[in-house]
Image (spheres, rainbow, N blue to C red):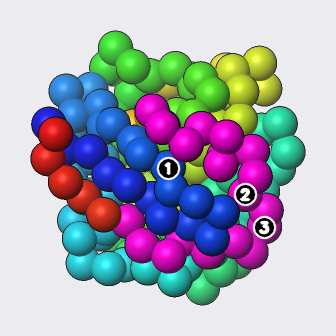
């Protein structure tokens, strides 16, 4: 089972992937991470009590990797709880590299079955609340557990 560490300017968040529920999304995130795509990008969008969002190469929220991936919405873990990582998109099947991490369930449950949940923070959850707009994703390290 693959896991990842998202190294940020505020600390490290360890995440576990939902490989069974969102295999294509996980594979895409792993591929981008291992290629260094996310290194040095920022969390360009932070909405308190909602989400922190990163993965835009130009830092505006409009950029991506140059391709789109399909949404995977039918798995068992498609619920936007605190610490869940989900794919941002501009409409169904338009995601690519941008992802967000949820602050809580109360304000994100309307995203269920609309955005693909593909991982969850299992260590360093407090860092999600510490991230501010412009904070850097230093690197993402993928390992096997």
Q: Which mark is residue 131?
A: 2
Assess disc 2: are there few (<14), some (14-19) or many (≥20) residues with their C-alpha within 10 Å of its C-alpha. Answer: many
Q: Residue at x 22, y 34 (%)?
A: 19
Mark found first going from the N terminus, 1 or 3: 1
Q: Which mark is residue 133?
A: 3
Residue range of the region highlighted in magenta in the rendering: 121-140
| Quarter of the image with the N terminus in it | top left
In the image, is residue 50 above or below residue 69? above
Percent of width and height locating residue 107: 78, 26
Q: Is residue 94 visible?
A: no
Image side of residue 118 versus residue 101, left or right:
left
In this view of the protein, which residue sits in the foreground, 77 or 14? 14
Q: CA distance from mark 1 to mark 2?
A: 11 Å
Q: Residue tagged by mark 1?
A: 13
Q: CA distance from mark 1 to mark 3?
A: 17 Å
Give the image quarter of residue 135.
Answer: bottom right
């Amino acid at each position: 089972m693959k896991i990842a560490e998202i190294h940020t300017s505020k600390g490290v968040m360890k995440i576990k992937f939902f490989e069974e529920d969102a295999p294509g999304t996980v594979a895409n995130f792993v591929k981008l991470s291992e290629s260094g795509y996310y290194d040095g990008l920022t969390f360009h969008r932070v909405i308190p009590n909602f989400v922190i969002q990163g993965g835009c190469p130009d830092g505006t929220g409009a950029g991506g990797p140059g391709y789109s991936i399909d949404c995977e919405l039918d798995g068992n873990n498609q619920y936007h709880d605190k610490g869940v990582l989900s794919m941002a998109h501009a409409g169904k099947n338009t995601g690519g590299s941008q992802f967000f991490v949820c602050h809580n369930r109360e304000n994100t449950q309307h995203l269920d079955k609309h955005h693909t949940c593909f991982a969850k923070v299992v260590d360093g959850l407090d860092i999600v609340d510490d991230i501010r707009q412009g904070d850097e994703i230093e690197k993402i390290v993928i390992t096997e557990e």
